[in-house]
Amino acid sequence: MLTKEDERLLSMLRQNARASVSDLARSLNLSRSTVQTRIARLEQLGVIKGYVVEFGETFTKNQVSAHVSIKVRQKLTTKTNVELRQISQISELYAISGEYDLIAVVQAQSTEQLSHLLDEIGNLDGVERTNSSVILETKFRR
């Protein structure tokens, strides 16, 4: 069970995972050792899995992103998932309910590269069909 302080700490880390423990402690009005202990506990509990690089606006504004809905032949689901994992431009892959089985979030450096990437996904053994939606603008991300 997360405490209110844990939730506030996680919120601050979500905004800036590189914030120093001292800065976090000051903002939370807690001691430095308390914050270190909380972070270690959250890591041990699996609440915090790791820390990642978040691309800056300068880089991402030149990227083309899309959501790709993917219908998979059921007998080839595992194989298809393994092949999709090998495509580095796919940043996220979700199993979903409904007409399609998966949604992939993809990034490309141009619409031409996106087109080739969509062809690559569509040509994978096990993929029956795809439907893509280009992301025009991100309104917010948490």
Image: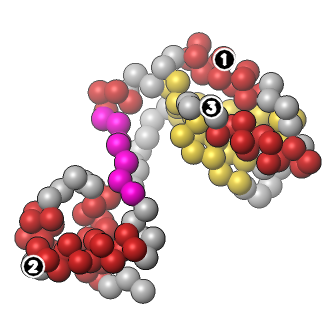
Residue type beneath disc 3: Ile
Is residue 66 visible to us here? Answer: no
Residue 133, percent from left and from top: 63, 34
Residue in the image at 51% along x and 17% along y: 110
Residue in the image at 80% along x and 29% along y: 124
Residue type beneath disc 2: Ser
Q: Residue 93 carries which label?
A: none
Up/down of 32 relative to 98, above or below: below
Magenta portion: prevailing SS class? loop
Q: Place residue 63 in its image quadrant.
A: top left
Are the residues at dot 2 and dot 3 in contact (C-beta closer than 8 Å)? no
Please, what secondary structure does the residue beneath circle 1 have?
helix
Query: According to the image, label 1 marks what residue?
Result: 116
Are the residues at dot 3 and dot 1 in contact (C-beta closer than 8 Å)? no
Residue type beneath disc 1: His
* Sequence order check, earlier mark of 1 and 2: 2
Q: Residue 87 carries which label?
A: 3
